[in-house]
Amino acid sequence: MDIAALSDESFNAIDWINGNYSKHLKEIEDGSVDNGVSPQQNVKDSVAQDFIAKYVSKLHLYIQQVHCVVEETSQKIVSGMPRVIKDAVLLQAEVEELKKRMHSMRKEMTNVHEETGDCMAALERLNTMQTKLQKAKESLQESDGWGNLICDLEDCFEHNNLKDAFEKLLSLQKSLQVQEQLVGHTERLAQVEDFKNRLEALASPNVVQSFVEGNIDQSKQYVNIFSGIHRVSQLKQYYRAVQKNSLQQKWKQILDIQATESTIQNDFLSAFYSHLLEHCQQQVKWCTQVFDNPRGNFQPIIVLIEVLPSLQPTRDSNILQLLKASNERLELLEKYARANHTFISHLIAFLEQSKIELSNETHFQLVQSVYGYFHKFIEQYPRIEETQLSTQVDKLLVSQPSTVDSVRHLENCNQKIFDWLYDACNRCKNITDDLGLCRLIEIMGGTLKKMLENFSKTQRQISLSITHGAENWLTLQCAMSLLQCLADFQIKLQKFEKSMQNRIIRLKENLVSSNSNKFHIYKICDSQEQKKLISDIDKYLQKFVETGSSYSSSATFFTSIYDQIKGHCVESHDIALNVLLKPVEGHLSNIQPSLNSTSDSLMPANMPEFSFVPQECITQVGQYLLTLPQHLEPLLFTPSPLLKQALEICNVKYTQSVPCADILLSLVVEQCCQLYQSQLLQIKSLSVTASKQFAVDIEYLSNVVEDLGLSISANLSQILVLLKAAPENYLSLSVGCEPRLVTAIRQMRNILSTQ
């Protein structure tokens, strides 16, 4: 029986009895328990009674045992209670005694504090008074020796004894510190400062001499002296003054050599920069040995920052003088800009090698000292570049005696003009680091417009060379060559514009990240200039739209230039059409406005049309049109990519997968039909015979055009129908024709309107 289950918090008597009963049945079935009943009888009632009897007897026995244990425990507790009560009473008495002792001790501590507090305050006052008295005593003692020190110091100054004067001055400084509490301290302080000034004046000639000679040992002694009197900053000023004077003399020497020797005339800046860099390297090593201050090796850098803006004559004035006397101003500016960049790059490498770290302010001052003077030349550069480009283009745009020579000259000019533009961009990079790029783009736009004016002149020259009524195949070839030249100009312009876009993007990136590049020339621009430049760049970038087509109407750097190129292409194409149409115009001009009306009475009314033959002028037009393919195919059957692109700019029809010769021929036929139609509509009156004659002419022209694989215009076809229509059927046959043509032909044929 599981007795432990009785103490479980979730004990359930029914579940416990049923569980034990099931376990009891299982044991009987397994044969492990013999209850006197045969398992084969399977009498559940007897098994249950037997289970109950056994478990009840066991429970009775367990209860009896529990009662015995409880009784025994109770007896022990009762017998021990008197002893527990006695211990509790004793413990309470001890607690009361402890409380009394603690109260008594607190009272004693309060009394002691009250009695000794006044004594401690008195002791503190006495100690303070003793300290003051001690200081006063020392001050009085030093005051007694102050006069002696003054006398000794004066004696040293009279004998120019710098070493002893320095030692006496140090003693005087210590004595002054001790006499801080005495009356007249301010006067004594002023007296000490006066002695420091006299000591500095006494030492300054020797200091300057030692700095000039570069004597390390003597310089160290003076550093020690000036450190003792707390005037190292003045000593460094002496050092910088000596070095600046030396560099100024070297600058004048280089300029004097420049004035006498032409070999160094344009290299004076590079020569001075080389000397300055070498001098800086030497002085950094020297200052590291002389000045104990960790920042002592910064003095040569400060000298460099101070000497460059203070050079006399200034760098910019000397450069301006040379620019005025030179015809190669851009080359000179490029040389001086390169000298600036080379110097700053070598200086950066030296600073990194020497592990000299400069503050942000020093970085800015250094860049300003090197590049600051060049800012005015960066502003002047676009104007100088504009002058040179204008001069070059003016020399290039020279009139040629013939149209062929003019076109060939333009072909050569294309490459030259863009070579000059690329050279200008390179100069802009070398001189201004592209700071003048936005202004240069405007200048280049003007240069390109001037170049396109030469295309206009050549177009006029080609137009004037057209002979009226004759075949001008050489002129046609010139027009096609001009188209090809224009396409070549546009392709070069697109390539150039793409390079400009990349450069202007890099310029913006450099301007935005100029803070990270501490030695960049962009630091010479103040914040307002940088903001304006970035704003100008953004305007250009917003305009620029990259497209894959040969021509785009989208805004670009040179939108007006592209518009002019398209206009010139269209004009050149019109010239080519005009060349091809001139013979047609000459033949069509022979069409008579009217025929002899009296001849109609001599002819039968039902005269067959096949008896008519086309007029000579129409047959001449037809023969001319039939000869056009053999003249156009050499030019346009397999045109060059440049000519193909130019034709596509002129007319969208050329973008079809059809030979350009066929498209041009169709345009010629279209214009020919238009000219013929205009010539016909000028006739005031037509007889029956004349109407039939013109109908035969139009049919002939239609057959010729069909032989070319084309068809006459719709208006001309309608005119043919209206000319052949009988007067009585005119109204019905004119249905679907253009009303303007119907009215015009009716009036020409003198057909009465039935409406």
Image: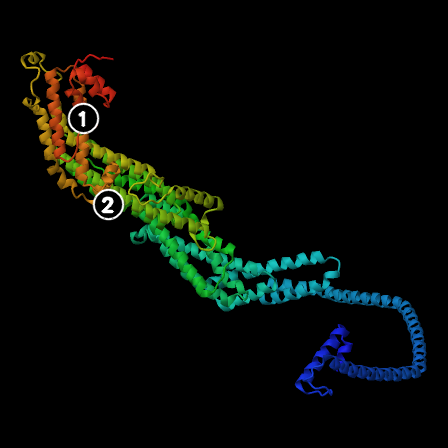
Quadrant into which the N terminus falls: bottom right
Relative height, residue 205 to residue 705 (above, below): below
Q: Nearer the viewer, residue 13 or 531?
A: 13
* Residue 414 in the figure: left or right of residue 587: right
**Label 1 close to label 2 by CB (< 8 Å):** no
Q: Answer left or right for 417 relative to 604.
A: right
Left or right relative to 636: residue 288: right
Q: Disc 1 marks which amino acid?
A: Ser
The span from disc 1 to disc 2 (Cα, nearest Å) is: 49 Å
Residue 106 image offset from top left, x and y in percent: 90, 70
Dot label at residue 753: none
Q: Quadrant of the C terminus?
A: top left
Residue 591 visible here: no
Look at label 2 and name its amino acid: Gln
Q: Is residue 661 visible?
A: yes
Q: Which residue is mark 2?
A: 415
Secondary structure at numbered mark 2: helix
